[in-house]
Image: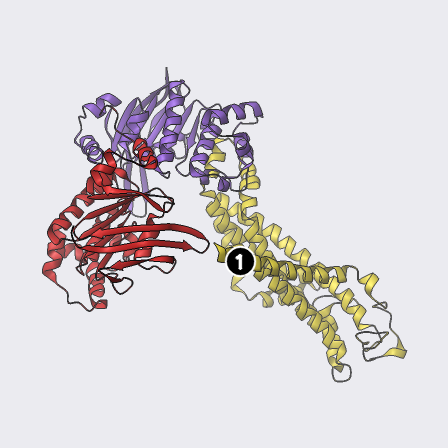
Amino acid sequence: MKQRTLREKKLKKRIIVVSLLALLIILMTTFAGVIAPNDPYTTSASSIRMAPGAQYPFGTDNLGRCVFSRVLYGGRTTIAATFLLVFISFSIGTVIGMLCGYYGGILDQLLMRLADIMLAFPQMVVAIAVAGILNAGMSGAMVALGITMWVSFARLSRSHTFSIKKEAYIQAAFFAGKSDFYIIMVHVFPNLLAPVLTNALTQIGTTMIGLSGLSFLGLGVVPPKAEWGSMISEAKAYIQIAPWAVLFPALATIITIIVFNYLGDVVMDYMEV
Amino acid sequence: MVLLEGKNLNKCFNDKIGYTNALQDVSFTLSKGEVLGIVGESGSGKSTLLRVISGMIPPSSGSLYFKGEEYTGKKPRQTGEFLQVIFQNAKSSFDPRMTMEKAILENGRGKKDKDEILRLLELVGLEERQLSRRAGELSGGQCQRMSIARAFYSNAEILLCDEITSALDVSTQARVVELLQRLKSDGKLSAVFISHDIALVSMICDRIMVMKDGRCVEQGSTDEVIGNPKDEYTRLLIDSVKRQAI
Amino acid sequence: MAECLLDIKKLCTSYDESMVLKEIDLSVYKGEVLCIVGESGSGKSTLIKAICEDKSVRVNEGSVMFKGSHCGHKLLGSSIGLVQQNPEGAFNPLRSFDVQFAETLKSHKREPDKEKLAAIFSTLGLKDTDKLLKMRPYELSGGMNQRMAIAASLLLNPELLLCDEITSALDVSTAIAVVDELLRLRREFGVTIVFVTHNLGIAANIADRVAIMYQGKIVEIGDAKDVLTNPKHEYTKGLLRDVPRLKAM
């Protein structure tokens, strides 16, 4: 008992610290307009590839744009797109999973085989192919990643729905004359929310890598718009002259992904205790 | 008045292992204010019978009547209007995220009557403060009382009790049995009581049906069956219990 | 009084934070059947675990001595046999019994003894020894598996057999048969039995002495007849009152 609660307390503390960090990152990018010292899109011939200093904390790039401001604005694009994508896949996947798990039958067989097919391809390869065909900037990249992402949510919520459906309280709800819709919304959904949300948290990191990766390859955002992946891609040409232009967006990506992945991990550990 | 009647019920399961006759030609009646006990060991088909009566699974053949009206093939959503099941594991028959009050209200088919809930709580020996608890915060015995209160709130006339005390301790079981005996003497209980324990059944039920391998081997009033068992298997059951008597 | 086989003195144990056993004093004498009766949470299973020196139970105080020496893993199996509630857990469900029996003997460096096995089987009322040994656990019913588990624990000639709720997963008529066979085993092999159960009826049937446990303490211990017909402790009285009885008996 004691050991368990001790471990629980420790994990709780960690969750608080990590989620504060995550919150800090989100707030900094959301309020990029207030924090950023310079306009991220203003080019300036007089300040090309300047080293980090007082006016440009992270230096400037090939066109004289402030790297710090661009990292903040770019973060906004990446993080907002990631959250939107995870939320949409979560919603679609969970609804499909619950319907499959609850009703079973042919619908279930069909959708789950479809999911199997999706899983058979490596996620990034599908994403590159789809994003290349769509050629529609950030929304194209999101669709490309979303095509395979809903599968994990669907499978998870399906298996949970399956076991919840066997519980006696679902039978009791039948005897209370409740409709399928009521049972799914009131009894099934709240009881599978916790594990599926945890999965969503762990997906944030991978999705970020995916989106930045597509942008890096030129399949995500269209250049003047700031985005970490595309910033790295642009600046890699002159990495020896102005390493800061690559370093800072790369660092921002790494730190953000570590924070969100770690958050997912601790929350998952906490759920298991 | 006959509340519930089953005629020549059969149930076959056809699964990977093969063809199993879980229920063979079982008939029964339940009158108002009466408690019918169904006794059998594991695999006797008593739980299948309960699932058939309640509508959770349809019988392969045979028919079911409530007050003379046939309801064979109806699903729990419809049968729930006149019968309620009390499950073996009371805790898992409540949504772990739902307060007891909500769970009871859920069974009212739209009815919202707090006074009635309080009356029912008093009837089953619980307190008002327990309404705000969730299943995990109550003991097994308390949950079982709650599920009896919930069943009564639905205005259903019949309770189907599936091994409701077998997960409980001896002393908790005795309290639940006392509750059922009290409800019965008040004339509030018409129930089918399923158990593997013939002694327990004899304490609550007016009539007893003994089941073995999906068949009803003996049926009659409690005094008859206990005092003068006709079937070999019934005698074996009674002897086993007598051997365990102190 | 006969030789004292198992001697428990002032035993206090805990799981992490909560105290589970409080100052248990208990002696088991050679050749007797001692029943430990209690409801869930009374600590009866913890007591068995403490005797087996299970690692999840922490002994804070007191000692468990088997014939004057500390007992533990070394004795478990050879001098002390343990049969648990779910017989399925004792065997690998997919391997035949003879292989599993042979492995048990091998791990204790004993030679297989066909005659002994046949004697155990016949006492347990198991016929067709060879055929049974070729079978696998999943092919047998719960009662048969429980008998096999008892046979397996008797293979090594233990002096003490610990039975933890072995009849509670069985049907009433099967439970009675298993109890009968246990009593026969004691007569023929002279094994001492500690039988843990929540069922007072079974205890009345099998025990020489009964110990009633409640909230981690032994509240009453004594001759089975005395305890069950003339209980002294309030808890025992309540327990006896609550046992379901056949009507009209």
Q: Is residue B221 visible?
A: no
Task: Name the image quarter holding residue C57.
Answer: bottom left
Query: Does residue C249 lie above or below C111 as drawn?
Result: above
Q: In yellow, which chain?
A: A
- Tell me, what hue is chain B? purple
Of A151 and C224, which appears nearest the observer? Answer: C224
B239 lies above or below C131: above
User: Is residue A139 shown left or right of residue B109?
Assistant: right
Hue of chain C? red
Name the residue located 74 percent from the left edge and 84 percent from the top edge.
A240
Q: Nearer the viewer, residue B218 or A216?
A: B218
Q: Position of residue A196 (x, y in %)?
A: 56, 53
Disc 1 marks a residue whose amino acid type is Leu
| Residue A268 vs residue B181, the one in the foreground | B181
Residue lying at the far left of the rendered structure:
C115
Instruction: Please report the residue visible at 50 percent of the width from the left and 27 percent of the height from the top.
Output: B121
Residue C160 shows in this picture: yes
As drawn, the residue found furthest toward the top would be: B1
